[in-house]
Amino acid sequence: MSEKRRIHLAAHIPGVNNTTIWSAPDAGSQIDFESFEHFSANAEKGLFDYLFLAEGLRLREHKGRLHDLDVAGRPSTLAILSAIAGITDHIGLVGTLSSTFNEPFELAKQLASLDHLSGGRAGWNVVTSSDAFHGANFRRGGYLDFAERYERAAEFVSVAKELWNAGVDAPVSHHGKHFDVEGDFPVPVSPQRHPVVVQAGDSADGRSFAAQHAEVIFSRHSEFDAARAFYDDVKGRLGQWGREEDSLKILPASTFVLGDTAADAAEKARETALAQVSPQTAIAFVEQIWGKDLSAYDPDGPLPDIEPATDVTVTRGRVRHENPAAVAKAWREKADAEKLSIRDLVIALSGRHSFIGTASQIADEIDRAVQERATDGFVIVGATNPHGLDDFVAEVIPELQERGSYRTSYDEGATLRENLDLPPLVPGSTSLVRTPVGAAQ
Ligand SMILES: Cc1cc2nc3c(=O)[nH]c(=O)nc-3n(C[C@H](O)[C@H](O)[C@H](O)COP(=O)(O)O)c2cc1C
């Protein structure tokens, strides 16, 4: 019998949005360190490959006011991960950091430092960030056009790799379109040499960037068929960079609702969705597309019968839909066909859970998706902070272990790259600064 593919799981540190139910009785603070302490201890107990932290560089606004209905604000990514490094031993520490609004020298230095402090557990989720609203927080309003954002990201990662490879032993001289870096790196070569490079971005440019530069992709395609289509597309791009299938792991974000029976899980899933999509949240979600104040509409009633505005930005700080009229039309068709109220539609569009069932059923689905090459694993997102993954670790992880496709202990002293079963970097090489196969060197 051939060996089973190993499942890779990451634990998503709860975000400050409505996926997290902040009104839950055991909800903790999104700022206090004890939340991070509990969350990371539990994730390490569950033998996850890494902890994952998203990043919002500006608080979202909706109708000119703070968008987040429950909590807003969080400490900075690298400060959190550095603190967690001190209280964990094995789990990887992956932070989202923008390649549009930072400088390579500074980020490379911080990430190499985290890699040292954690004994080789650092990872960097490279995002290009979404809009000029974020850019306004930065020097020179650092926002760029779409194409330039990925061009800058590619050069950014290349410069970072040059700096990491040089350590304190060699000068660095880089002169490109976006960066001029001339000098010495103050941090010695770190345990992993290059912290693991992760990518999140879905466009064709984003996927090409990942195929060339990334070792992990954080995707949004968790449903089996969509996951497999994404997997085939991205893994199919690796050959042109001389890379093998397993040199890039794809881990989609996925939520779950666990019950004692299938019926119990289905009931809990409905309750969880209603807690995540309050009447206020449902209206705000639809306002993002309609570009108008819809507070007079009943969330338990039908969608507005008026057309969306064409050029109004009601919400600032999240990825925009390019064609609101088309989105409104599709939503109306879905709501009509399935007889959905505004709130039910929003739940169907945004609040659908990836896995609903008993521990054994969820483990079967996760295992199947990995064995059948729809994915390499998942980034598991809980519904509360900081206890959202407690039952997953207690109940689903043992089921995965029984199926023989999940680790039963960490390898002593393993780096994040080793946790992920990624190929080692060749010492001293610049192999991750890639040129296409067949191109002149
Ligand atoms: C799954 C996923 C997660 C993302 N997480 C973040 C994030 O935490 N912070 C951020 O600034 N941007 C995040 N982004 C947005 C990307 O930075 C990028 O701006 C956006 O996806 C547009 O690029 P694209 O057209 O290639 O997808 C995320 C994107 C995806 C697909």
Image (cartoon, rainbow, N blue to C red):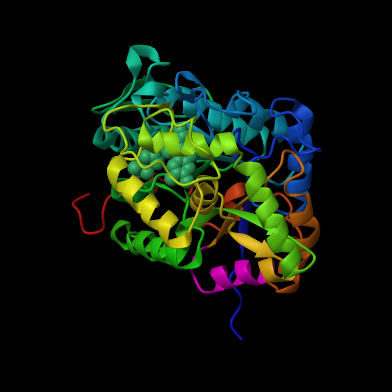
Report x, y in % for residue 433: 35, 44
Q: Quadrant of residue 32?
A: top right
Against 284, residue 142 (above or below) is: above
* Residue 74 figure quarter: top right
Using the rendered view, name the quadrant where residue 229 is placed.
bottom left
Examine the rendering and report whether any part of residue 433 can be seen.
no
Name of the residue lying farthest toward the bottom = 1
Quarter of the image where the N terminus is located: bottom right
Percent across and percent down for residue 41 are: 78, 43
Question: Which stretch is magenta?
Answer: 363-375
Residue 273 is situated, as x and y percent measured from the top left of the image, at 63, 49
- Residue at 40% over, 60% down: 230
**As displayed, is residue 25 above or below residue 187?**
below
- Residue 401 seen from this side: yes
Residue sitting at x 25%, y 28%: 176
Query: In which of the image's four quarters is ligand 1 placed?
Result: top left
Furthest-left residue in this view: 440
Total number of numbered discs in the rendering? 0
Say if the magenta span includes residue 248.
no
Q: Residue 76's spot in the image, x, y percent?
A: 59, 24
Tell me the chief SS of the magenta region: helix
Q: Is residue 188 left or right of residue 128?
A: right
